Amino acid sequence: MDTVERELLNTIQTNFPIMPRPFQSLGERAGVSEEEAWERVTKLRQEGIIRRLGGVFDSHRLGYHSTLCAAKVPQEKISDVAELLMETPGVTHNYLREHDYNMWFTLIAPSKEEVEQILNKVRSVLGSDQVYSLPAVRLFKISVDFNFKNKTEKSKPELRNIGLQKTPGAWRRGEQAVVLSEQEKALVRVLQVDLPYSLTPFAEIAQMLQWTENEVLELTRSLLERGLIRRFGAVLRHQKAGFTANAMGVWPVPEDQAHEIGKKMSAFREVSHCYQRPTLPDWPYTLFTMIHGQSVEDCQNVMERISEETGIKEYRMLFSKAELKKSSMQYFMEEND
């Protein structure tokens, strides 16, 4: 991967231009022509480094219910549970991690009742009740933004604040979802899949929907400005991009410190997700930080830096042993059935 491709990836992860000729803007930033920018991005898509190019949506704002689930799965049951979760549309990610709670998966569904129905199916296949839902109490950050600069160009936590919510208390569960119009839902259905391979992708979408290109651009920008789209850009296969290690760092932070500590943790660029979640009788950890690195040592170094910055000395790192599923959620598809 050369300097041009690294510059393009640094840009399009979070800031793909929503304009008639996006690759013209990308080319100007990277110092190449529009055609070369398009060819470079197309190459990264075809090589599988870019998994998807499009909108990443806020499930809560769209009226869906999401949660992180933890399960204690004995070795002989792993394949059965993994197969069920692979076939369940609302399960977007499923990882084996190094802990007694060894299977961690994200679950998104149109209602809390449907979430619980799915979890009961998992418990039935597992033959155990040890499947737990840990929905976010507070969100500090979601910003999967890999840094493709040289390793010597380290980010300082006080200089980065990517993805931190602007509201004083960050996002808290209980905020109202937005009721979308049928036109907005139609656009969500298109933007949640891959952008067309075209120099003018929004014109292609307009033709698909039988709208004008300006209607597509204006409504896409509106969804982004209102926070319904969390980010518009490239979703990467981080292993193919060189970030082969990932760890879920968990911290036992008291409630009265969670807000301040969560803000500090989320300021690290290497932290892609930062949440406050409920505890369990044998799980005292309240803050979760998802960390990606080019090696196990990279992840460990980030955790040490976070510990030093926050003063929280106790923590655990749950490294990924296997990625069992990774997909994008498909919203409002049940209304098309």
Image (cartoon, grey):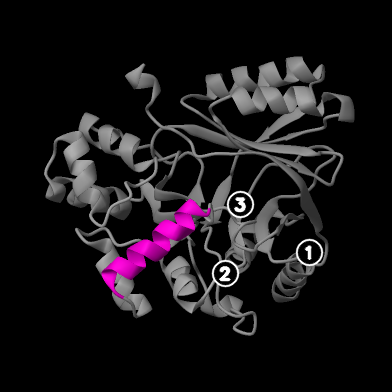
Quadrant the C terminus occupies: top left
Q: Is residue 298 visible?
A: yes
Q: In screen coordinates, is 81 left or right of 25?
A: right
Q: Which mark is residue 275?
A: 3
Which of disc 2 and disc 1 is earlier in sequence?
Answer: 2
**Span colored in magenta:** 33-47
Q: Can residue 14 be seen in this view?
A: no
x then y, percent, for residue 230: 41, 51
Where is mark 2, residue-wise? 267
Q: What element carries label 3?
A: strand
Label 1 is placed on what type of residue?
Val
Q: Residue 45 colored magenta? A: yes
* Whether residue 120 is situated above or below residue 8 in the rendered picture: above
Label 3 is placed on what type of residue?
Tyr
Q: In screen coordinates, is 192 left or right of 292?
A: left
CB-based contact (under 8 Å), mark 2 and mark 3: no
Quadrant the N terminus occupies: bottom right
x then y, percent, for residue 228: 36, 46
Give how far apart the Cα atoms at labels 3 and 1 are: 22 Å
Where is mark 1, residue-wise? 296
x then y, percent, for residue 22: 27, 62
CB-based contact (under 8 Å), mark 1 and mark 2: no
- Residue visible at 50% across and 72% down in the picture: 6
Which of disc 3 and disc 2 is earlier in sequence?
Answer: 2
* Whether residue 177 is situated above or below residue 42 in the rendered picture: above
Q: In screen coordinates, is 124 left or right of 328?
A: right
